[in-house]
Amino acid sequence: MLPTTYRKMEYIENATLGSYIDTGLFASLDMVVVVDGYAIEGNTALFGSRTEPMSADCFTLQFLGAVSMVYRFNINSVQKSAPLSFPKGERHIFVFGNTEFRIDDSVIGKANARALESYYPIYMLGAMNNLGEASAFGLTRIYSAKFYRGGVIVGDFIPCMSAEGEIGFYNDVDGSFHGNAGTGELTGAAESFFMIEIASQPKKVSYKKGESIDLTGMVVEAICESGYREAVSDYEVRGYDSSKLGAQVITVAYQGMTDSFAVVVEEEPEPPIVVPFITLDEMKQYLRVDFEDDDALIDMLIKSSEKLCMDIARVEEKTEYENLENAKIAVMYAVAFQYEHREDADHHKLTLTLRDLLFGERKAGF
């Protein structure tokens, strides 16, 4: 099984010449290789290792794309060519072993070699290992490759993309990743996503009527059947109506897949009615003023007098001051005093009077 940070690919192929995979495995007479794939172009190899053609160190599955246009199986000095009925570009299952060469259900032959030297690890995907160097570069495609030794699997190569985004094969037997060992480029088809999931809900799910939707904190992940997950951002959000009160189901869509989450839209509460501590009309009645010319002045004196009284009472919060027993009369007296003596007000005298009015409420100061 692939690590969850690896994305499975349907297949891998050579995008350009010079790309190949080093399996790290060495051939033996009891090795059987099962490869799902095909040759695309050129003199190439699905896999192989040798010192030279027809040598005792020869373990290759080639496609002779220059002249013969056939697949050729090679073990030791034995060569068996497949008929032309298996051309390039068509997907097949190749079974390669000393006792049998097979393409799909067709037996091509067998080697029955009595000895096999193995000096170099097997390369695959467009090249074979020839004297420690990659050769027979061509273009091939591989969907999977399994290597057995004595009936025991030693290499199960799964096409994938690593957590770092490198294309290669993951050997599920020993957990090793084999990326491009050559100078060319590899490409392939990544496994499709089959569902999305809202991995993290938006922080805000309760709205007031008219508010725009806020997706801060939401994480959407696309998921493959292999278990690979990838965060996506180019999704579409549907179903939110800021004018519709009540619960709403919001749909998140990505490449034809959907998931949803719920929000609630509530009516905006009416702002609380703020009743002035002392209204303008109330103050004008106290002053016996029945004209509007001084309304702005009186309103200003109400605000400044309340601040003055709060300072004298040593109270910082307006609501706390307004709950004092003599709070209102003190403010009204201060307004009246300043209004009637606005040209020659004695503020020291006013302050002393307010202290007397607020004496019982005044906080101690040090």
Image: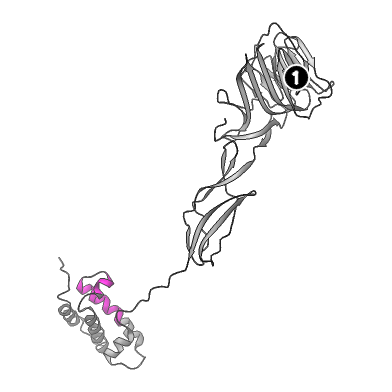
Q: Nearer the viewer, residue 362 or 301?
A: 362
Is 315 contained in the magenta span? yes
Residue 80 appears in which quarter of the rendering? top right
Span of residues in magenta: 301-321
Q: Position of residue 307 (x, y in %)?
A: 27, 75
Identity of the residue furthest to the front in this view:
105
Judge whether 40 appears above or below 202 on screen.
above
144, 287: nearer the viewer: 144
- In this view, the residue farthest toward the top is 114
Task: Specify whether residue 316 is painted magenta.
Answer: yes
Residue 221 image point, x, y percent: 56, 45
- Relative side of 259 to 125, left or right: left
Give residue 269's quadrant in the image. bottom left
* Quadrant of the image containing the N terminus: top right
Do we see residue 182 in this rendering? no
| Residue pointed to by mark 1 | 102
Residue 151 figure quarter: top right
Tag 1's secondary structure? strand
Q: Is residue 136 left or right of residue 145?
A: right
Q: Main secondary structure of the magenta part?
A: helix
Whether 114 is drawn above or below 254: the answer is above
Residue 168 vertical position relative to residue 110 in the rendered view, above or below = below
Report x, y in % for residue 187.
68, 34
Q: Is residue 103 above or below residue 246?
A: above
Residue 187 is left or right of residue 366, and the answer is right
Tally the marks.
Answer: 1
Residue under the image location 54 percent in, 66 percent down:
244
> In which quadrant is the C terminus drawn?
bottom left
Question: Label 1 is placed on what type of residue?
Answer: Arg
State whether residue 287 appears in this view. Answer: yes
Packing grade of label 1 (10 A; few <14, some 14-19, many >=20) is some
Q: Position of residue 359 (x, y in %)?
A: 15, 76
